[in-house]
C-alpha cells in the first residue's frame, strides 16, 4: 500500500509504502480519538468487497514527491 502526504503551499510531499502484514494494533489506551466514538453504542454500517481502482486517486502532478524509503537517516556516533 502506498500513501501520499503533501503540502499544497510548498508543493512538496512524501511517498511511503506500508506492508499491511507488518502493522501491529496499538494497545495504547492514551491514543486520542478525534471523533469521540462511543464504543458502547451500536453502529449501523455495511461493508462490501472492493477491488483496487487506480483511477480513484491520482497524485497531484504539480507536487514534487520524495520516496520516504529512499531517505538516508544519518547515524549519530557513540558519545564518550
Image: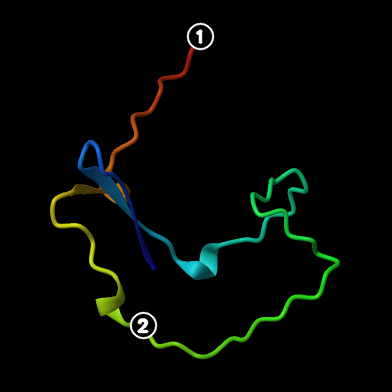
Q: Nearer the viewer, mark 2 or mark 1?
A: 2
- The residue identified by callout 1 is 80
- Reading the image, the residue beneath label 2 is 52
- The image position of residue 33, as x and y in percent, is 68, 51
Nearer to the camera, 73 or 57: 57
- Give the left or right position of residue 53, taking residue 25 as reference: left
Image quarter of residue 10? top left
Left or right: residue 2 compared with residue 46: left
- Residue at (74% x, 54% y) in the render: 27
| Horizontal side of residue 72 vs 43, given as left or right | left
Q: Earlier in the sequence, mark 2 or mark 1?
A: 2
- Residue 2, placed above or below residue 48: above
**Residue at the location (29% across, 70% down)?**
57
Nearest the eye: 20 or 5: 5
**Label 1 CA crowd tier, 10 Å (few <14, some 14–19, many 20+):** few
Of residues 20 and 39, the one nearer the viewer is 39
Q: Residue furthest bottom?
A: 49
Residue 74: x and y, percent?
A: 33, 29
Mark 2 residue crowding within 10 angstroms, few (<14) / some (14–19) / many (20+):
few
Residue 14 versus residue 56: which sits nearer the camera? 56
Q: Position of residue 64 (x, y in %)?
A: 17, 47
The CA span between labels 2 and 1 is: 52 Å
Residue drawn at point x = 45 percent, y = 66 percent: 19
Position above or below: 61 against 32: below
| Residue at left offset 72%, top offset 53% | 36
Amino acid at each position: 500500500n502506498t500513501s501520499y502526504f503533501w503540502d499544497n503551499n510548498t508543493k512538496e510531499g512524501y511517498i511511503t509504502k506500508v506492508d499491511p502484514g507488518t502493522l501491529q494494533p496499538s494497545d495504547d489506551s492514551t491514543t486520542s480519538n478525534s471523533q469521540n466514538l462511543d464504543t458502547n453504542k451500536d453502529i449501523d454500517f455495511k461493508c462490501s468487497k472492493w477491488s483496487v481502482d487506480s483511477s480513484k486517486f491520482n497524485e497531484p502532478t504539480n507536487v514534487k514527491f520524495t520516496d520516504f524509503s529512499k531517505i538516508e537517516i544519518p547515524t549519530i556516533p557513540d558519545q564518550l
